[in-house]
Image: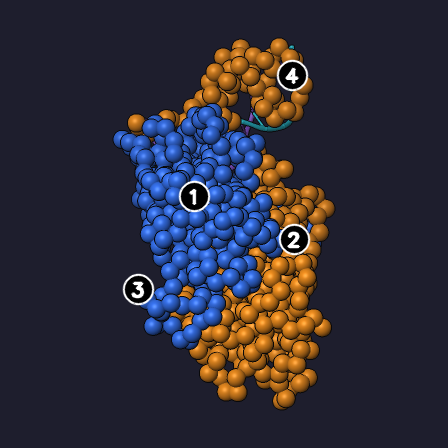
Chain colours: A blue, B orange, C cyan, D purple
Amino acid sequence: MSAVSPSGSTIRDVARVAGVSLGTVSNYLNDVKPISPKTRVRIEQAIENLEFVPNRALRTMHGGRSPAIGFVVSDSPDPFFVEVARGVEDVIRSAGIVLVSCNTKGKQEYESSYVKVLAEMRVTGAIVMPSFEHSDVPFRGLRASGAGLVVLGEWDDDTCAISFDDRLGGQLAIEHLIELGHTDIVFLGGPGGEHQIEQRYLGALTALSPFSPDASLRRVDAAGVTVQDRAFLADQVLALDPRPTAIFAASDTLALAVLNELLRRDIRVPGEMAVVGFNNIAAAQLAVVPLTTVSVPQYEMGIRAAQLLLDELRPGHVHQQLLLKPNLIVRESTRSVATPGLEGPTNKASRRRPQD
Amino acid sequence: MSAVSPSGSTIRDVARVAGVSLGTVSNYLNDVKPISPKTRVRIEQAIENLEFVPNRALRTMHGGRSPAIGFVVSDSPDPFFVEVARGVEDVIRSAGIVLVSCNTKGKQEYESSYVKVLAEMRVTGAIVMPSFEHSDVPFRGLRASGAGLVVLGEWDDDTCAISFDDRLGGQLAIEHLIELGHTDIVFLGGPGGEHQIEQRYLGALTALSPFSPDASLRRVDAAGVTVQDRAFLADQVLALDPRPTAIFAASDTLALAVLNELLRRDIRVPGEMAVVGFNNIAAAQLAVVPLTTVSVPQYEMGIRAAQLLLDELRPGHVHQQLLLKPNLIVRESTRSVATPGLEGPTNKASRRRPQD
DNA sequence: TTGAAAGCGCTAACAA
DNA sequence: TTGTTAGCGCTTTCAA
């Protein structure tokens, strides 16, 4: 078979076939004025026969916007943005708006070029998670094009922004570990989402400072999450002297990788090593030893971001900055519990202690 | 702060400020005719000063397309589409094209409305994974709008289609289990991606038929992948009489959920129960007992689909149907191996046997 | 309720 | 190399 057919018919064709005027068809399409039933039927038949598809893109000419919003984020080891995107989509779907997802892969040049294309497409707006501590220059074009903008992360006051308190998240994780008596803790960082990781690290340090120098936080950074990476990571952690009794990982993916590696080496979790993750991905609670983690309300971030963006288009809109709070979810990887609801009274993998 | 600013300046403004004609600015923007250095500079300054952003959406008027392609898929328990999308994006990025991702959530109405919006946006093309065995009616609009179309899945000959041999995948999995001596096997199906799951099931049956009635394939369907779901699932599997010695799950997420639950119950994998998954997601090899699975070349599917789509736009294009083949990846969840590269000589979780 | 006509921002053909 | 001009498909007055 051959290539796609040429562009098809226009509103003018429809008008001609239906025997009405151009403006009437336009009115019909936009449902903006009453149409007599007879005319309506004739127009609909004409549209049917001609396989006419209105060109929405042209609305942008008369001040309208493309029925799309951009979503510009970077990959990270956790499928963070998937959940956020789901939230965004759930809000905008009812408005007939569609999601343009742009993965910057952490490259600034990708980010700028995506933002540029979005502006030129005249999208309704964009939700951007900047990978860098850069100026707002890349967003100027978006603004100038008339698009709305919501930044995911901290930003200045004349922009809508939704951020998450990564720092507090780090604090909660460490406070939990300290409460359990851990003082030798190792922080697992990298790769991806550098800014967030640093915030989590800073939060961890903050939580530890009242106890220093009695408590210590050492740090190891992962190169990736392959089998080799995690084996190397475990080697590094276990080689630390004195050996830490707890791990705080900057992402669940990382935490689970290490957790599984520890179990493979017959190291008891949490008995010999407690593990805390970050993000509360679905796999966290499904792990062999369910993972204690700091939950990030990803879906809610998506919902809020989309709502803010739609609000930007309304007259009288006032920019808002939201700061969402973390939530510690305690599971077996830090504190063994008897779980009456689950079958299997014994569990060698996690060596349960009596419930406290 | 207040709402977004109005739409900004036009090519006409640029021409006026730069002191050149409208057509010259257009030529500059499209890089279609030589421009004298002096004029170029003046245009660029005008663009800068006015913060002019060309309206790409209007290209669709002169037969052009929106610099976007649609990606219409449904959620499934495995983040299948994330990898496919990555492949697509990697191909189209260099062409300055952007990905519009539409999650149908398995609802036919969402699918049709997304396809409609895409057609009206005059996207360059769309990659669609139909959730249903429906006619091609929903795609008519896309075609009529002049967009390219690549279907992910089996489709008729006058469309580009990329499909994956799910059935063969099911066969490979079962053949592997039979080779290892398993005859009592249970198939784990649902939820999400119903069509693929059935194909995998059929493949499994096919592989088993030479051995029937000596071998049996029973089936259990999961309602979801929560902790409760998987516990219930494990209960069902373990209650089967005679108890199966192997599980073939229709997705890795499902397989890992059950695998972890079995380990929690101190059931040895693969000793007491072998487990095979499907898709080869990243977590499969990172499990406590690395998961044997059927790999689906998701990233490659994305690459191919995007290439086919771009090819559709070229004159003389001929529709193609590709069938990608599965690949069995054997790991410890079916066959214990000593892994010299890994530390930790013993491993209670998987009870290694000597390498065969 | 419908039609006629002007014009949106831009491209493309042609003339200069 | 640049300017002029006629549209592209559609929306939006304004009149009828």
The quarter of the displayed image where residue A33 is located: top left
Residue type, mark 1 in image: Ser
Pinpoint the chain carrying mark 4: B
Of the image marks 2 and 4, the number of the one nearer the N terminus: 4
Reading the image, the residue beneath label 2 is: B300
Please name the amino acid that badge 4 sits on. Ile
Relative to A154, say whether B352 is above or below.
below
Q: Is residue B294 left or right of residue B241?
A: right
Residue drawn at (59%, 18%) of the image? B24
**Residue A124 seen in render:** no
Disc 1 and disc 3: Cα gap in Å?
26 Å
Mark 2 is surrounded, within 10 Å at the Cα level, by few (under 14), some (14 to 19) or many (20 or more) other residues, namely some
Mark 1 or 3: the one toward you: 1
Q: Nearer the viewer, mark 2 or mark 1?
A: 1
Q: Please, is residue B251 above or below residue B305 in the view?
A: below
Residue A317 horizontal/vertical position (percent): 29, 32
- Frontmost of labels 3 and 2 is 3
Q: Cα distance, mark 2 to mark 4?
A: 41 Å
- Residue at 38 percent of width and 43 percent of height: A214
Callouts 2 and 1 close, C-beta under 8 Å: no
